[in-house]
Amino acid sequence: MKAVVKTRLGDGAVELLEVPKPSLSYGQVLVEVKAAGVCGSDVHFYRGRYDAYLNPPVILGHEFSGTVVELGEGARDVKVGSRVTVETHARVCGKCMFCNTGQYNLCMERVAFGYGTNGAFTGYVAAPSNRVHELPEKVSFDEGALTEPVAVVHHAVVDRTPLVPGCTAAILGPGPIGLLVLQTAKMMGAGFVAVTGLPSDAKRLELAERLGADLAIDVRKEDAVAEVRKASRGYGADVVFETSGSAQAMRQAIQMVRSGGQITRIGHGAGEMSIDLDPITVRQITIQGTFSHTWKNWEGALQEMASGKVSVKDLITHRLPISRWKEAFELMERQESVKIILYPGA
């Protein structure tokens, strides 16, 4: 079968190669991949920016859906023929404090599809049966492939952020995660939601408005902090979601949040950054990190998509065969896409 493989560390070193179909270990199922989403992290892996996480040679791709075609010994609660999506967690230890308290996303031995072990930019994936979720009837394979970012956002917004009906929220970065935070915040009852971006995000900011943003701000044309304060009687946002990973956005988040408010940081990748900590102290600002997802977030995400409360269909801008993976990555780099679906069988 064909696979998009990161062959070594560093910039580039990604090829479309012929690889064998995976064999099953105890408790695993074989999933025939029907659709796979391209994440911004896939491009970072391609460019060598996230080498610390990589275990090459490895098949990229961690957002996917498909059909169960084979059950391994010990596989439970899954049937052949089921339409499914699979969590990013390929392996966790199952014994540590985090695993024993349902926080297996924080397991120190966690291995993830698409960079720690072989992922979904290929025809078949061997997946642990206890990380497989059946797709609701109303959720297509394309939508199911994007369950992972919806689950990430469900964890960040529903589990980790004190978002109450009528509150003011600001979202820094109108990428896929930011646009999903927007929809989830509205679903949770946020009264006013502002989304900020750069001039290169113009189309994404337009999409944010169509998805319900009360204010979409180009930070190079308008003073985003002043606009958010104006919309909140001078206080600032009750909650700010930093989804871009940039140091400048994090500094802006501290200026934008109200005293006693919370910043939830979902974006990462900026590395070390210089931030004045005094405003965090004297204004009693809470900064909350959030990472990945757990079982309940996936089930919550699937329910949100099935009910139409959160739409990923509006985010899909391109659909390509897996042979055109490089074109997909280049579209992402040029910010000419929002979400791209790759089809291994095409």
Image: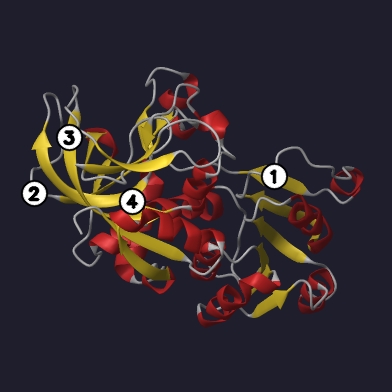
Label 4 Cα crowd, 10 Å radius (few <14 / some 14-19 / many 20+): some
Residue 232: horizontal and vertical position, in percent? 77, 74
The answer to whether mark 3 and mark 1 are in CB contact below 8 A is no
> In front of the other: label 2 or label 1?
1
> What whole-number distance in Å separates the C-alpha atoms at marks 3 and 2?
18 Å
Residue 244: horizontal and vertical position, in percent? 64, 55
Instruction: Indicate the quadrant where residue 238 lies.
Output: bottom right
> What whole-number distance in Å separates the C-alpha atoms at marks 4 and 2?
20 Å
> What whole-number distance in Å separates the C-alpha atoms at marks 1 and 4?
31 Å
Disc with the residue nearer the chain's start (2 vs 1): 2
The answer to whether mark 4 and mark 3 are in CB contact below 8 A is no
Q: Quadrant of the N terminus?
A: top left
Disc with the residue nearer the chain's start (4 vs 2): 2
* Kind of residue at disc 4: Glu
**202 left or right of 342?**
right
> In front of the other: label 3 or label 2?
3
Residue 107: horizontal and vertical position, in percent? 47, 26
Tag 2 residue: 81
Disc with the residue nearer the chain's start (1 vs 4): 1
> In front of the other: label 1 or label 4?
1
193 vs 128: above or below: below
Residue 340: horizontal and vertical position, in percent? 40, 62
Disc with the residue nearer the chain's start (3 vs 2): 3
> What whole-number distance in Å separates the C-alpha atoms at marks 3 and 1?
36 Å
